[in-house]
Image: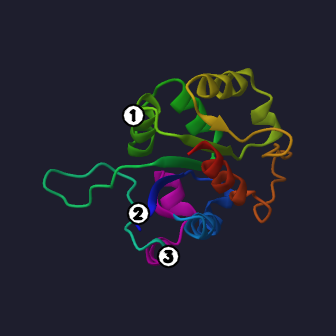
């Protein structure tokens, strides 16, 4: 039986170093995870060799050069976690200036099921731009796991990375797909 493919867009935020937990949950649920980190996530938060060993795939966070192998298989779904204020706002505004954002713009338009699990503090969350961006993503068919029973903002400089609800994203996949 072939496994379903999920792209995991990993943004540069505190919980990113624990994305292996999401990969483990996804594998247990029958998903094959391909990690697509932002540049910040890759440089500052991720243990790339350990994650490549865990997933069995190279991480892919940049555009390929002409003739370079490594094309991603087609995605059955996408998880964006931990989704930062920056990525959420740029994505909702249609900005595709990085490989992860280009994938998100294309896959949102193609109707691929997408789950976003934010990680923002209460000051960012109180910004009207952020609220509008979440509304825009929802209007585009994206499942946003934000609010009571999902991710709730933490105080500035007070976030806990060990309790980030990775499992909620995989559970939402199984409901949406």
Query: Residue 129 or 24: which is nearer the viewer?
Result: 24
Separation of marks 2 and 1 at Cα, in angstroms: 19 Å
Q: Dot 1, crowdedness within 10 Å: few (<14), some or many (≥20)?
A: few
Separation of marks 2 and 3 at Cα, in angstroms: 11 Å
Q: Looking at the image, which residue is at 80% across and 29% down?
A: 126
Query: Residue 148 or 1: which is nearer the viewer?
Result: 1
Q: Looking at the image, which residue is at 77% across and 66% down?
A: 162
Residue 15 screen position, x and y as percent = 68, 60
Which is nearer the N-term, disc 2 or disc 3?
3
Query: Residue 10 or 56: which is nearer the viewer?
Result: 56
Q: Is residue 44 magenta?
A: yes
The residue beneath circle 1 is 106
Residue 109 screen position, x and y as percent = 43, 28
Find numbered disc 3 in the image and state the secondary structure of the residue it sits on.
helix
The residue beneath circle 3 is 54
Mark number for residue 114?
none
Q: How is the image coloured?
A: rainbow
Q: Which residues are magenta?
A: 31-53
The residue beneath circle 2 is 59
The C terminus - image quarter: top right
């Amino acid at each position: 039986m072939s496994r379903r493919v999920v792209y995991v867009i990993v943004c540069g935020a505190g919980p990113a170093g624990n994305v292996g937990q999401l990969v483990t949950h996804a594998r247990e649920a029958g998903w094959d995870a391909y990690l697509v980190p932002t540049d910040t996530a890759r440089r500052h938060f991720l243990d790339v060799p350990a994650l490549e060993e865990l997933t069995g795939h190279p991480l892919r966070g940049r555009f390929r050069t002409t003739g370079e192998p490594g094309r991603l298989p087609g995605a059955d779904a996408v998880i964006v976690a931990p989704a930062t204020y920056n990525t959420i706002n740029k994505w909702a505004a249609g900005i595709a200036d990085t490989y992860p954002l280009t994938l998100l713009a294309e896959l949102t338009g193609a109707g691929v099921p997408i789950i976003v699990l934010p990680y923002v503090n209460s000051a960012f969350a109180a910004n009207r731009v952020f609220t509008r961006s979440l509304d825009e993503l929802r209007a585009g068919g994206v499942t946003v796991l934000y609010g009571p029973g999902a991710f709730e903002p933490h105080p500035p400089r007070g976030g806990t990375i060990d309790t980030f609800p990775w499992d909620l994203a995989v559970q939402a996949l199984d409901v949406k797909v």
